[in-house]
Image (spheres, rainbow, N blue to C red):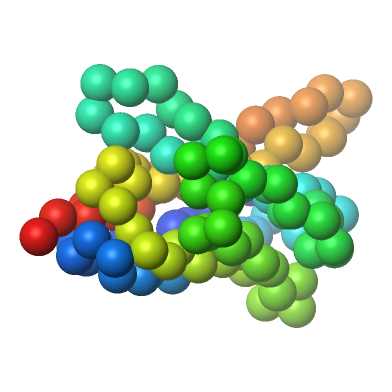
Amino acid sequence: QVQLVESGGGLVQPGGSLRLSCAASGFTFSSYAMKWYRQAPGKERELVATISSLGVSTNYADSVKGRFTASRDNAKNTVYLQMNSLKPEDTAVYYCNVRTYVGGLWDDSWGQGTQVVVSS
């Protein structure tokens, strides 16, 4: 059973930094790309970052390019999101996601989310 557990959220002032972590279990972590999404109040969930299975390639939403960095440690089954130069509009619940292939079907799994609040 796939499990994803996010941590590292909190309250930070504009311009500050946070590092989110997502600990994964229940699947072959190093075989799958991982994604970070976020959802702000009253808004749809938004894809923030994707990192390939071996961490060689990453992609980011335009709104976070140059400020956020996704990375992963396949030995620890953990993916990270380093968030710098945070803005109030980055306030959201952040989720990690994996789409695994099991029994001939693709299946999306989500963590419980971690709240990030950027405010002075």
Query: Relative to 108, is 97 above or below?
Result: below
Residue 72 in which image quadrant: bottom right
Q: Quadrant of residue 76?
A: bottom right
Instruction: Report whether 33 appears left or right of 21.
Output: right
Residue lying farthest to the right in this orientation: 104
* Residue 23 at least partly seen: no
86 w.r.t. 36: above or below: below
Q: Tell me which residue sits at (14%, 55%) in the image.
A: 119
Which residue lies at the image location 40% right of the left edge and 21% below the top edge? 44
Residue lying at the far bottom of the rendered structure: 75
Q: Position of residue 104 (x, y in %)?
A: 90, 25
Residue 50 image point, x, y percent: 68, 47
* Residue that appears at 22% across and 55% down: 118
- Asked whether, in this view, residue 97 is left or right of residue 75, the answer is left
Q: Is residue 47 above or below residue 42?
A: below
Q: Who's the residue at 56% across and 58% down the image?
A: 66
**Count of numbered circles on the image:** 0
